[in-house]
Image (cartoon, coloured by chain):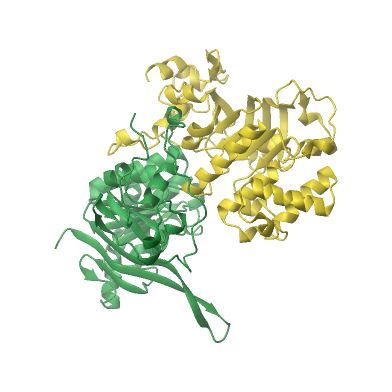
Chain colours: A yellow, B green
Amino acid sequence: MTDVNVKMEALAGVDPNALPLQVKDLHVEFRTRNGIAHAVNGVSFDLRAGETRAILGESGCGKSVTAQAIMGILDSPPGFVTGGEILYRGVDLLKLPESERRKVRANRIAMIFQDALSALNPVFTVGFQLAELFRMHRGMSRQDAKARAVELLDLVKIPAARQRVNDYPHQFSGGMRQRVMIAMALALDPEVLIADEPTTALDVTVQAQIMALLAELQRERNMGLVLITHDMGVVADVADRISVMYAGRVIEEAGVDDIYASPAHPYTKGLLESIPRLDLKGQELSAIKGLPPALTNIPPGCAFNPRCRYTQEVCREDPVPPLYQVSPSRTAACHFWKEVKGDE
Amino acid sequence: MSDLVLETRNLVKHFPLTRGVVFKKQYGAVRAVDGINLELRRGETLGIVGESGCGKSTLARMLVGLETPTSGDLFVQGKNMSRVGAEERRRGRRNIQLVMQDPYTSLNPRMTVGDIIGEPFEVHPDVVPKAKRRAKVQELLELVGLNPDHINRYPHQFSGGQRQRIGIARALALNPEIILCDEPVSALDVSIQAQVINLLEKLQNELGLSYIFIAHDLSVVRHIADRVAVMYLGKIVEIGTEDEIYETPTHPYTQALLSAVPVPDPKLRGQRDQIVLTGDVPSPADPPSGCRFRTRCWKAQDICAEQEPLLQIREKSGHPSACHFAEVRDVVHATE
């Protein structure tokens, strides 16, 4: 890549020494006809440059809503950010007016989505959509912008980029489309990339290609990556640190090795145990019983208590278990984390 | 009767590609399934794995009779389903039932659970007399771990995992011998997946069912299957017991597929011998000559383009493998 930063729009108050992304006590709720759904209830995490932070959780745990809040693309109404801070190098994005926020989006924090076919505009060529970024954010001429679009398609290893740049999204295969999305996200050289289930819709061999590409691009640019996923195999392969979410809260936060070796929250432990493993062939899988709670009606105390095998009276009562310091570099929101971690 | 409950011989399904509105002219065909030979024994689970577009769902639809094969034979309990009369075919179909992938679209939202599970009895009225049907439906609900009192509820009142249980109850209604599961857990969350897999295994033990289990999640298939067939572009490229396929894969595609599966253990990061395939799956309307995998294969030589490798036991492969250069390669160091 050449001179991408030449005309980067200035943003007041940026501290180059602060972390590229910090989320502090984020709250998001959806005001629906059936009551208020508490989608995110106090999520905090940090992201260093070059680091991969996985946000792990099942559907409805609030992981995608967190990403949308960071990008400022929450459907509002019904969604509202009701508290917390999202800091980009020390600047609280939630306090910025929309016009300032646009300078952050795609420029400094970019996002790729699960379903590339619905994320790309079907009536414009991918070249046009890529070039649009340079024309809007960098004020380039059509011709220059198009040339940059070809460079980008080359970067994400799309064969015959010069010809493919004039193709429409439906003319690409699933994996190629995901590459186009990655190209689009990386166009303006962001410092943080949020990937929301980037490979869930893809086959395993294509998934391997895309994850290898992402890892390579991340290394080259020392970019921070927030990887949102439910796939524990992918997380084990690429993540540095993991935040496990359940019912809108981070219930465990630790380095990747710690989580897999000795989970300190019963939910994390249950998730890991429910993966089919070689040595358990022919045996019953240990499933987590029951269902996740409805976000309109989260039980008092620990949200996981109705499904947990460690539950005691204290778990059923408010307040919610705090994030206990399990070791200097990890936390878990379970009153009985010692037992959970211990009997491994 | 032998132990063989289901057998296919050279099963083929081509979807014609036509041009013109009034005078349709066929100019080609999508060769979705191109000559499949399978055997399923009583009480056995046969896993079928492959990526999207490899024809595994078309195969499933042919096995349950939702799609008519272009050619080839399907034997259910020794009877050739393409030769018998309509009445007998209908009765034969009773023995093979389908559990579908998406529990959200495979249940009619306007029917109660009781009606959904009881509907098979209207097609096959002789299975359970009318007066006993409601009791039978409640029994089925209980069997799959749902509350029998919820018989009058509608699908939207259930979660994804519970809906999949309803689909399983419906498949069990006619006391089939064979259940065909087409990606039964891929739409579910991990913690719910395990519940449904456990249920399927429990039912197999209790009712002596045979399963054909189609999935793209290789670890789930490994957990549940006794034998595994790997499909690529409408053909089986390798078939064997679960151990043979996962421990000693000999076809390059199987090896690439297995090596691409992320292992949920960070300690193995970087230690795995990962084969990253280049390119995409070719179009099934115009498959490569000879071996269909040769365009993405690192072992491909001239013979691969000229001569189609047959699915057979080879010198360096103890189980059937459709590769001229079949050879064991240790790809996953899953055991520590």
x%, y% of residue B79? 22, 70
**Snapshot quadrant of residue B287:** bottom left
Q: Residue furthest front?
A: B302
x%, y% of residue A331? 54, 18
Say left or right for B97 vs A200. Answer: left
Number of marks in the rendered image? 0
Vertical side of A259 occupied by B141: above or below: below
Q: Quadrant of the N terminus of chain A?
A: top right
Q: Depth check: A309 or A85 in front?
A: A85
Vertical side of A326 occupied by A259: above or below: below
Say left or right for B182 vs A104. Answer: left
Q: Depth check: A215 or B190 in front?
A: A215
Name the residue rendered at 57%, 18% in the picture.
A322
Do we see residue B50 in this rendering? yes
Vertical side of B91 occupied by A5: above or below: above
x%, y% of residue A167? 67, 60
Do we see residue B125 in this rendering? no
Q: Residue furthest bottom?
A: B23
Q: Depth check: A258 or B62 in front?
A: A258
Q: Quadrant of the C terminus of chain A?
A: top left
x%, y% of residue A224? 65, 31
Name the residue rendered at 33%, 60% in the picture.
B97
Say left or right for A162 vs B264. Answer: right
Q: Depth check: B241 or A155 in front?
A: A155
